[in-house]
Amino acid sequence: MDKPKIKLNILGLSYSQTQSGAYALVLAEEEGERRIPIIIGAVEAQSIAIKLEGLEPPRPLTHDLFLNFARAFKIDIIEVVIYKLEEGIFYSELVCLYNDEIVRIDSRTSDAVSLALRFNCPIYTYEEILQKAGIVLDFGDQDEPTPEASKKSSGKTSAGPRSPLADKTMQELKDMLNDAVEKENYEKASEIRDEIKRRKK
């Protein structure tokens, strides 16, 4: 008998401005308060962030190419399952439909989540994984899993150097964001996007 699956939603992404390459993807159980923070690479984080923000890169990224390739050959991803947690590493699989048959493909979790966004399919995990890795955050505080974010929220980094983006108007930031996407500078686009988000709060 199959184990019952628990649906997850993407709560958000956070990153450290002082520690290059440190990104956290936060997944939340749909009917509960537990969160799973997953450390992912910069390329995957940018791919997820671009889709979450509805940005359209001028050329397809790797995950967009995968989507186009799959559609061309009538392959669909119907769900993503995070099925194992071992030594701090999350293991995921893509559950695909091809010629009316189910095909399961092993995947890194960061890639799986990025593809789930593009195929508009659900993300699931199991209770045992939520018991191992799930944490309960303060309401509305999605940045808590990362140490750097904790420093920001506690004000410890407020005495640091002022961001050059802080002096820009909202319109300037939006223009800079569009320019960064056009030039495929997605790391810069992520920084600008977060500055815009901070101002909207």
Image (cartoon, rainbow, N blue to C red):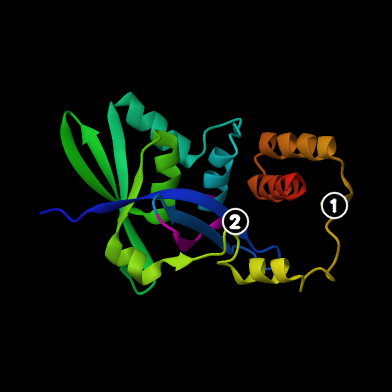
Instruction: Tell me if 110 is positioned left or right of 58 in this view.
Output: left
Question: Is any part of residue 84 visible from this angle?
Answer: no
Q: Is residue 33 magenta?
A: yes
140 in relation to 103, above or below? below
Against 11, residue 128 (above or below) is below
Q: Measured from the top left, where is residue 81 in percent x and y?
A: 30, 51
Q: Tell me the crowding category of disc 2: few under 14, some 14 to 19, or many 20 or more residues within 10 angstroms, Cα based.
A: few
Q: CA distance from mark 1 to mark 2?
A: 23 Å
Viewer-proximal residue among 166 and 35:
35
* Span shown in magenta: 32-43
Residue drawn at the location 20% of the way across and 41% of the way down: 103
Between residue 53 and residue 75, name the one nearer to us. Answer: 53
At mark 1, the secondary structure is helix
Indicate left or right for 24 with 116 as reference. right
Q: Quadrant of residue 118?
A: top left
What amino acid is found at the position of numbered circle 1 in the picture?
Answer: Ala
Q: Are marks 1 and 2 in contact (CB under 8 Å)?
A: no
- Residue 117, image x and y in percent? 45, 39
Image quadrant holding the N terminus, namely bottom left
Secondary structure at numbered mark 2: loop
1 vs 2, front mark: 2
Mark 2 is on which residue type?
Gly
Residue sitting at x 32%, y 46% = 80
Indicate which disc residue 140 carries: 2
Residue 166's label in the rendered image is 1
